[in-house]
């Protein structure tokens, strides 16, 4: 159920256990009292509706755990588009070849762009020919001057660079989610 929620909301659910009271040791014998409090929070607001529980709770095969956790981990980096993109691309890279035929030509093209941008943000300097051509045409200030071979560099401190990368995060998130959902359907179900 937790994996299903993490996939649905793209955020990790974390359990933090904190002692709220130390054990009480009565002086004249008796029982020891220990209090623990369990708190779950993700800054969510909800309207409480009294209704019976659903017939089936959302569940996802544990075999999808690695993909879902990687996907949900991207939600930890809302201020860092390059980190979100890297995590989405881990999923895309692993599952794309199996499910590429399920995507239309537009998504095929977007996947290629996502791959180029992921290379751009994942290397101190990148001189891969396709990446350099793509980036230099769209983000000229990423070109590193004075190199014998054309090279580009991602500058995390540049608002222009972050915005450029951030524009492809919605597509990388959507494609990664769709790939996970396709892969889940192929996982064996346990009755």
Image: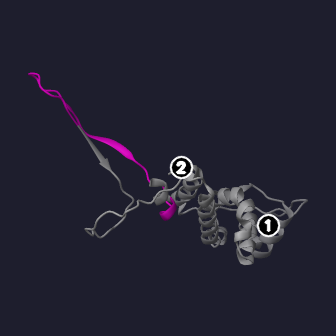
Tell me where residue 186 appears, x and y as whole percent.
63, 58
Q: Residue farthest to the front?
A: 191
Tell me where residue 32 appears, x and y as whole percent.
18, 29
| Residue 74 against residue 35 in the figure, above or below | below
Q: State whether residue 83 appears in this view.
A: no
Q: In the rendered image, which quarter is residue 27 located in?
A: top left
- In what element is the residue under mark 2? helix
Q: Which residue is depicted at the point 72% across and 76% down?
A: 104
Mark sitting on residue 62: 2
Q: Residues within 10 Å of mark 1 (few under 14, many from 20)?
A: many
Question: Is 80 situated left or right of 117 in this image?
Answer: left
In magenta segment, residue 97: no
- In what element is the residue under mark 1? loop
Tell me where residue 140 appears, x and y as whole percent.
77, 72
Question: In terms of depth relative to the viewer, which is nearer, 57 or 14?
Answer: 57
Question: Is 191 situated left or right of 160 in this image?
Answer: left
Q: In the rendered image, which quarter is residue 161 located in?
A: bottom right
Question: Is 107 situated left or right of 149 in this image?
Answer: left
Mark sitting on residue 48: none
Q: Residues within 10 Å of mark 2 (few under 14, many from 20)?
A: some
Chain part drawn in magenta:
7-34
Mark sitting on residue 143: 1
Q: State whether residue 23 appears in this view.
A: yes
């Amino acid at each position: 159920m937790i994996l299903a929620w993490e996939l649905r909301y793209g955020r990790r659910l974390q359990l933090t256990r904190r002692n709220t009271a130390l054990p009480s040791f009565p002086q004249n014998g008796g029982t020891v009292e220990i209090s623990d409090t369990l708190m779950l929070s993700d800054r969510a607001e909800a309207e409480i509706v009294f209704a019976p529980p659903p017939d089936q709770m959302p569940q996802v095969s544990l075999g999808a755990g690695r993909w879902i956790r990687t996907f949900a981990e991207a939600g930890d980096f809302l201020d860092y588009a390059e980190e979100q993109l890297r995590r989405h691309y881990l999923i895309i890279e692993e599952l794309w070849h199996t499910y590429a035929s399920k995507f239309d030509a537009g998504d095929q093209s977007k996947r290629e762009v996502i791959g180029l941008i992921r290379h751009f943000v994942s290397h101190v300097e990148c001189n891969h020919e396709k990446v350099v051509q793509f980036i230099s045409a769209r983000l000229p200030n990423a070109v590193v001057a004075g190199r014998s071979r054309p090279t580009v560099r991602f500058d995390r401190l540049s608002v222009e660079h972050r915005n450029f990368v951030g524009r492809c995060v919605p597509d990388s998130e959507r494609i990664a989610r769709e790939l996970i959902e396709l892969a889940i359907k192929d996982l064996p179900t346990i009755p």
